[in-house]
Image (tube, rainbow, N blue to C red):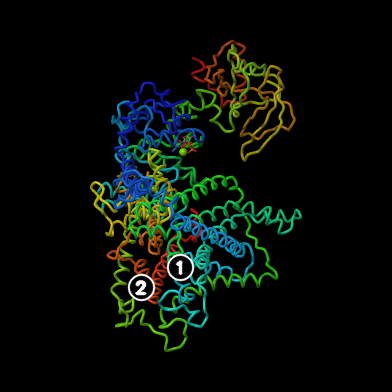
Amino acid sequence: MSNITLNNISKYYTKGHPPAVDQVSMEIQDGAFMCVLGPSGCGKSTILRMIAGLEHLTDGEIVADGRVLDNVAKGLFIPAEKRHIGLVFQSYALWPHMTVTRNIEFGLRLKGLPAHERKKLVAEMITMLKIEGLEDRYPAQLSGGQQQRVALARTLAMNPGILLLDEPLSNLDASLRLSMRAELTRLHQEFGTTIVFVTHDQWEAMTLATQIAVMNKGTLQQIGTPDDIYERPANRFVAEFIGNPPINMISAETKPAQQLMQQAGFSTSLTEGALLGLRPEGLLLSKEASLSGVPVTISDILPTGGAWIIELTMAQDDTSTMPSHLVHTTQIPPRWQRGEQAYLNVASHAMHLFDTDGKRKPLTLTLTPKAKTYRTAADRISPVFNQPKIEDIS
Amino acid sequence: MTEISHSPHLSPLQKWRHRLVIAKCDPTLLIGLGLLFVFAWLIAAPIINILFEVFTVQTGDEMRTGSDAGQMTGYYLERVFASRMSSIIFWKPLWNTLLVSITSMLLSMVIGSILAWLLVRTNLMGRRWLSTALIIPFMLPAWTFALAWTTLFKNATIGGQPGWAEAMGYQLPDWVSYGAFPTIVIMTLNYIPFVILLVGNALRRLDSQLEEAGQMLGASRGRVALSIVFPLMRPALMSSALLIFADAIGEFSVPYVLGLPVQFDTLATSLYRAIGTQQNGVAAVFAGVILVVGIATLALDTWMMREARRFAIIGSKGAMERRQSLGWLQWPATLLALIMVFIGVIAPLGALALSTVMHLPGRFELSNFTLDYWIGTNLDTVALRNGILLSSEFWNAAWSSISIVGSASICAGILGLLTGYIVLRSPLKFVSVSLRQITFFPYLVPGIAFAAAFLTLFAVPHGPIPALYGTPIILFLALIADQMPFASRAGISAMTQLGSDVEDSARVAGAGWLRRMFSIILPIQRNALVTAVLMPFISGIKGVSLFIILAVPATDVLTTFSIRLIDFNYTQAANAVVLMIALIALFGTILINRLTGTGLAQGLES
Ligand SMILES: Nc1ncnc2c1ncn2[C@@H]1O[C@H](COP(=O)(O)OP(=O)(O)OP(=O)(O)O)[C@@H](O)[C@H]1O
Ligand SMILES: [Mg+2]
């Protein structure tokens, strides 16, 4: 029910140190489920705290629903207690001296709600978040997952237009994570609340968010849908941060790299120092040299339960300074032996080219008859990967 | 990369306006500045003022100095340091002070360290029970023991009832009964528990594997002690020694009780006498000297502690607690500890308690026992014709003690917690740093010098503040200021543990500052607050220095009441009052231990 706009916001905690947040702009639409994703210390929590009003900006502006929350140039600031934005803390921050009920009730009391309404709302929240029977316990008597749900209940009871969640699933075990994840999705759909949540876990981000903002060292790297982020990473950082196991990076100037691009149907005019990223799951191995794949040696096969990681070594190219090791993942039981020779092709959409400065460089299709043959061949091997990317064709 | 280079479009004016707007939303800064102002007035002003007094002609000294009151003068310095009288009024007391402080410091360090080692590192029999018994003196006022000494060993040099020894027919020379010797003994006994606590804690943290590693390499036990344990313990030992020395030079009550009959003066008692005889300029010089020595000692300690941090890694978390077997030394060691318990606790407290139920000292006949001094009526004394529990003077004094010390402690506790809050939350670093330092400052200043400083500032009206001497307010303010180090430390450590998230989450829920204080911070910090109130309360109840200078008969408290009883030779009644004070202090300490769940030792160090 609310939208938030961040205009070039920056935060310097200590003068002379690099900024925790550096000129970040984003538009969070009404009803969005936005995820801020990035490695530890990249400024995710800081962004949430600035939206909530617990930290002030060093520069820039935050607007929510047309209300300026913080603007340095104009000297405007609304304190946290008057913003009515919900925030669930990374540490939950339950009040240790209050029971679960009192924790949930606290904000409602401040709102001045009469007792019977408070009671009704609290009961509702307790049922919704499945914490029945814990009403009279103190936070110290709750497990991590229960504490988290109390923290959520406490925030949701206030029915905030904007809900901020700081690593909401990080302290939970695998099964609780799944159920909480489902809970969050349901909440989002039911209440239409604008949610901004922070995580360093790409799985969480990809599965929950409608929009992902990837951050690194205080700067915004890319903002887009989960598909955008994965299929069209804006730069080398995003490509390497998203994906598990991480994307293979090889020098684009080496002979094998050139060969792989050609087979995928891309033109190969290159700038110096460019890098070619190959998603592990887009690698295709075959026994025959007929598809003129790049010869590789299978150096190791690691089962990961229903999937396999296959490590490959490329024949060393003397122009290459990059490692000639590649990682490939597959769900199909591998029919390879360690030390065996194979030929490598890569599906076109699993291939990403990055400039010297790390920026994404669109690969251009050369629809020569020869390339067409390669594409068809590659796609025959892996029919799943056969849709060319829109961006690449245009 | 500075802030400016990244937002070139923002003028400094804009930034300041933004900050001002933010500061207006949150009273933290304002309260911080308020606290800073209060402490500047209560702590910094008196001390700066007394240093000025040293160089200022006092009223009444116009003739002697040949200039008007208020003028600059070097008269007092000269009189104290370089006049015909100097050796009597300054150098002798200085010598006495140093003699008493250094000797008792060394003795308590040696005995205390041995006991600490026995308790922490060996399989001494009954060590758990002993470690409690041995630190009891720490909870009691030092002059309890001085009184016990006079009860036992007073001779006929001064009037009043003789001590038990004389009553039993032993003639005691003056040097046993009064002066340097008993003062050193009593102060040593008083500091031993302090050494046991500090050194014991350090020993506990010292990884016994380090010792064992030395032994494995073939070093003898003595060798290990000398070349491994001692160097590692040196910071803790030095620190204890300096803290004791700094405390000892300002000690007033013990030399007052034991030194007076033979004109044995220390700096603290000289200061008291100078104030008593209206020599304010000279008093200021004494106070200044005590102050400078105290500050220098503790500055040295702070500096050395910073150096010692380099050793901090030594005490690893997984330090094994392994005890050395005492072997044939078991019996002598146990005996030593028991003797210390007897000398330090049983004998003095027993003597005091017995003396209050005996007409004549040292005569153990049934007819000699009485409860008159507690609950008797119509006694044949000049004043105090009832037992203390039935005398209104006692109850008045007790009530003043509890109300003045109590209200001051409550204020100190709240100010301490508030200081902790501001120190951790202030948006301006300078506010938190200066608050932390100024509240710690009275710790560096011996109580008697601080009291003198307070007297010089508040005895005369200043601006809107009337002269406060003779009112309970001056005691109240002095107590608050004097106790701030403990209160603010308790507050800072409590707030450090709390973290800011619980408060932030209340902000997000819509709670303003006052609401957060009363609904979140104070309830969570309830125990810390109680500690921050009780610690000052105990040390205030048993303290002498502040009251002896600042109290007048109208504001009689338990300590001054009992000292007056001593001066009038009502030994039994005085002892009874002191026992009551000891009881309150003991009870309060036990309460703190219960509440915080931590031993005294941790409380001392934090
Ligand atoms: N109060 C503070 N004072 C000074 N520096 C801070 C403060 N809070 C955060 N920082 C710094 O700002 C940077 C960003 O911190 P932030 O907490 O936003 O990271 P994060 O992305 O949430 O990391 P994590 O995933 O570990 O929670 C870090 O380098 C951190 O050290
Ligand atoms: Mg964080």
Mark 2 falls on what kind of element? loop
Relative horizontal placement of residue A33, taking residue B340 as reference (left or right) = left
Amino acid type shown at disc 1 = Val
**Residue B603 in view, yes or no:** no
Q: Write down the residue under mark 1.
A: B262
- Label 2: how many Cα within 10 Å (few below 14, some 14–19, many 20+): few
Residues B302 and A380: in front is B302
Q: Write down the residue under mark 2.
A: B568
* Marks 2 & 1, CB-CB < 8 Å contact: no
Image quadrant assignment for residue B566: bottom left
Residues B73 and A216: in front is B73
Relative horizontal placement of residue B315, taking residue B401 as reference (left or right) = right
- C-alpha separation, residue under disc 2 versus residue under disc 1: 17 Å
Check the residue under mark 2 and report the chain it is in: B
Q: Name the front one of labels 2 and 1.
A: 1
Residues B6 and A232: in front is B6
Q: Position of residue A196 (x, y in %)?
A: 40, 35
Residues B443 and B52: in front is B52
Mark 1 falls on what kind of element? helix
**Residue B374 in view, yes or no:** yes
Q: How many marks?
A: 2
Check the residue under mark 1 and report the chain it is in: B
| Residue situated furthest right in the rendering | B218
Amino acid type shown at disc 2 = Phe
Image quadrant assignment for residue A188: top left
Q: Position of residue A201 (x, y in %)?
A: 51, 37
Q: Position of residue B590 (x, y in %)?
A: 44, 66
> Does label 1 lie on the same chain as label 2?
yes
Looking at the rendered image, the quarter that the N terminus of chain A falls into is: top left
